[in-house]
Image (spheres, grey):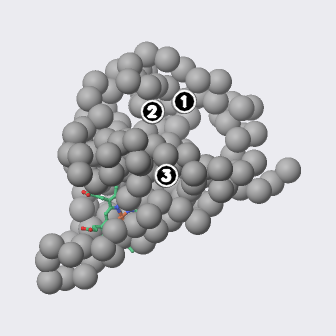
Amino acid sequence: MRKIGLVIVAIIFAASGGLAQAEGPGDPTAVKKEDDGKWLDKEGNPTYKISADGTVDWFTYSGYRRYHSDCHVCHGPDGMGSTYAPALKDSVKSMSYGDFLGVVASGRKNISTAAENVMPAFGDNPNVACYMDDLYVYLRARSTDAWGRQRPAKKEEKTEAYTKAEDACMGKK
Ligand code: HEC
């Protein structure tokens, strides 16, 4: 299952034109909800849905947790960046969804400066690879300030479809 996920990542990445493109994801308005609780924008890219009372969709919540377990050491809390790695809250403004998946799966080594800051490849790490959309949705919500620097307190329920896909991806029965 994980391999299939990676192939899909590679296809999306290739379709997006690789790293050459510097175009953001556009209008983040959620128009459609998938069975697993994931919201999509009008282009079909994953996006967030935050209600007036502060209830976040499951992916935003899950992405918050995954970000703070696997990314914040380098990228700073809440996507704010650090001296070592860029603020992802800003990065996703000018990156397509496909570019995001590509960099996270394959990693990147900064060759533009003397410093050798390395973005590790997470494609083979199920704790990240199985939660790509969660991470993206959370960071997209941060990029528009739809979600602030706090931990989401109220969230939509985790769906059965999400749990099924998660277990399959993580190799559980
Ligand atoms: C060991 C430190 C480290 C960790 C952990 C890390 N990153 Fe990175 N990341 C970097 C560095 C350094 C760069 C900049 C690389 C470059 O300039 O080529 C980067 C770049 C990126 C970029 C491209 C940003 C841009 O503006 O082009 C994305 C997207 C990204 N990381 C996502 C993530 C996500 C999501 C996680 C958690 C799953 C994560 N990173 C974990 C160090 C890290």
Residue 108 in view of the camera: yes
Spot the residue most to the top: 31
164 left or right of 35?
Answer: right
Callout 1: helix, strand or loop? Answer: loop
Q: Earlier in the sequence, mark 1 or mark 3?
A: 3
Residue 33: image quadrant is top right
Q: Earlier in the sequence, mark 3 or mark 2?
A: 3
- In this figure, which residue is indicated by the disc labeled 1? 38
Q: CA distance from mark 1 to mark 3?
A: 21 Å
Question: Amino acid under label 2?
Answer: Pro
Which-is-in-front pick, marks 1 and 3? Answer: 3
Q: Are marks 2 and 1 in contact (CB under 8 Å)?
A: yes
2 left or right of 124?
Answer: right
Q: CA distance from mark 3 to mark 2?
A: 17 Å
71 left or right of 164?
Answer: left
Residue 137: image quadrant is top left
Mark 2 lies within 8 Å of ligand 1 (Cβ measured): no
Mark carried by residue 10? 3
Question: Amino acid under label 1?
Answer: Lys
Spot the residue most to the left: 113
Residue 151 in view of the camera: no
**Can you say whether 161 is above or below 91 in the image?**
above
Give the residue at x 71% y 55%: 170
Please provide percent x and percent y for residue 34. 59, 23
Mark carried by residue 46? 2
Q: CA distance from mark 2 to mark 1?
A: 7 Å
Please provide percent x and percent y for residue 68. 45, 59
Give the residue at x 49% y 52%: 10
Question: Amino acid under label 3?
Answer: Ala
Give the residue at x 60% y 60%: 127
Crowdedness near tag 1: few (<14), some (14–19) or many (≥20) residues, C-alpha within 10 Å: many
